Amino acid sequence: MSKSQQPHRLRRLLAVESARIMAEEGVVDFRVAKEKAARRLGAGGDAQHHWPNNSEIESELHARLQLFHGPAHAVDLRELRERALKAMQWLEVFQPRLTGPVLNGTATRHAAITLHLFADAPETVIFFLMDQKTPYEESWQRLHFGDVPAQEYPCLKIDYADTEIRLVIFALDEDRRSPASPVDGKPVKRATGQQLRKMLE
């Protein structure tokens, strides 16, 4: 193999191994998957110069799930989407939108469901969960919108029907713009409950 081919081959191997790690080990963070892949391939300190982008890894992930997990993946994905729909109906007062791997089809069996909620204040969602006697964990999620500096958004992690759900809370007037996707930087896709129901039909 010529030296000019080596970086391309390494990039390809890192994409394939990163996708395998995400599919089989439940890793959801692209950077973590890349770092694990680089270590396992013995790529050394120069690996970052040849790292695949997130779009390449997601493409490999779609292919791997179809090739190696086929019907089982389809069943798992449908079950996650059905649980997401039930959770969205439960949280309908906050105009929930489904996003992330459960929507785009790369979620594995133990993936978390990510919902974007819209409220006048984060406390409104917290009070709702307290009224429902639903335990939650608080954190923050850093999101980008185009070229403006990243913003921190409150995030609540709950357990619903034995599934982890991440509730990212936005202001009421933020329902028309989506944050940038970690995959390709474009506005992340969101689905309403009605759109998800049509997908399931």
Image: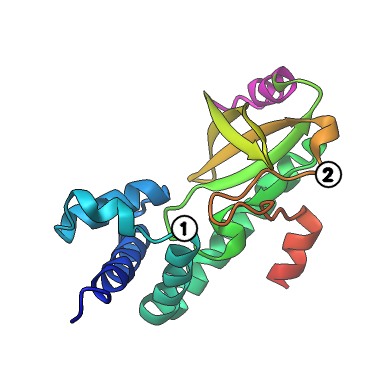
Specify the principal SS of the magenta part.
Answer: helix
Q: Secondary structure at mark 2?
A: loop
In percent of the image, x 52 and y 25: which residue is there? 139
Magenta-colored span? 123-135
Q: Secondary structure at mark 1?
A: helix
Q: Nearer the viewer, mark 2 or mark 1?
A: 1
The residue carrying pointer 2 sits among few (fewer than 14), some (14 to 19) or many (20 or more) residues within 10 Å by Cα, namely few
Q: Is residue 93 left or right of residue 14?
A: right
* Quarter of the rendering occupied by the N terminus: bottom left
The residue to which callout 1 is attached is 54
Name the amino acid type tagged 2: Arg
In percent of the image, x 70 and y 17: which residue is there? 123
The residue to which callout 2 is attached is 176
In the picture, the disc for residue 6 is none
* Observer-nearest of 160 and 142: 142
* Quarter of the rendering occupied by the C terminus: bottom right
Residue 98 position within the rendered picture, expressed as x and y whole percent measured from the top left: 67, 51
Residue 105 position within the rendered picture, expressed as x and y whole percent measured from the top left: 55, 66
In percent of the image, x 19 and y 48: which residue is there? 45
Residue 70 position within the rendered picture, expressed as x and y whole percent measured from the top left: 44, 79
> Is 80 within the magenta?
no
Name the amino acid type tagged 1: Asn
Q: CA distance from mark 2 to mark 1?
A: 25 Å
> Is 128 within the magenta?
yes
The residue carrying pointer 1 sits among few (fewer than 14), some (14 to 19) or many (20 or more) residues within 10 Å by Cα, namely many
In percent of the image, x 44 and y 60: which residue is there? 108
